[in-house]
Image (cartoon, helix red, strand yellow):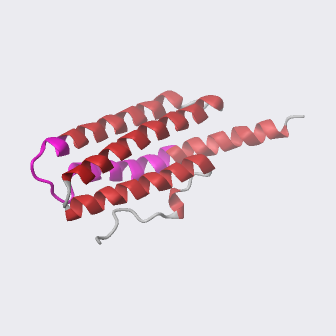
Amino acid sequence: MTDTLFKWDDSFLIGIEELDHEHKVLIDDINRLHEELAGYKERSEIEKCLGDIYVRMQAHFALEERVMKEHDYEFFDGHKREHDKLLDSYTESMMQLLNDSGVFPNNPIEDALEHWILNHIITSDKKMSLMVQEKKASKAKLP
């Protein structure tokens, strides 16, 4: 067994339980992909991991966008553009990996996923969460 790419850390928590849960599951999926790439035994397993991550990312972004709309998040358009760009980047890296005959550690798909974890979740998602929680608190104070 190889080292994980990401170790879950409470700094990844954004404070919205269902989104935090999905972030944890996605990190587990990314670590599984990392292990498959490092061990490279079965191409079919790598393809399955890639597909699982793609489907989860799509579903996760849809849920996150629903939460933002429900709370009239003022930076929705920019955040959605980030999601679209991240999904496009992942798709491009995934297709490149699938079309490549050789699989190698530290490939571009892991870089794309690392960018998403380190930049998007910790900055953009936390910013969104704080604003959503403030709006919830304000609504709760209304008579």
Residue 131's spot in the image, x, y percent? 63, 40
Q: Is residue 65 visible?
A: yes
Residue at horizontal 62 percent and vertical 45 percent from the top: 130
Res. 122 visible in picture: no
Taking 69 as reference, is 55 left or right? left
Residue 41: horizontal and vertical position, in percent?
19, 61
Q: Nearer the viewer, residue 106 or 94?
A: 94
Using the image as rendered, state which of residue 111 and residue 30 is in the foreground. 30
Asked whether 130 or 44 is in front, the reply is 44
| Residue displayed at 43% across by 43% down | 56
Q: Position of residue 15 (x, y in %)?
A: 62, 52
What is the quadrant of the C terminus in the image? top right
- Residue lying at 70% horizontally and 42% vertically, measured from the top left: 134
The magenta region covers 96-124
Q: Is residue 48 magenta?
A: no
Image height of 6 relative to 108, above or below: below
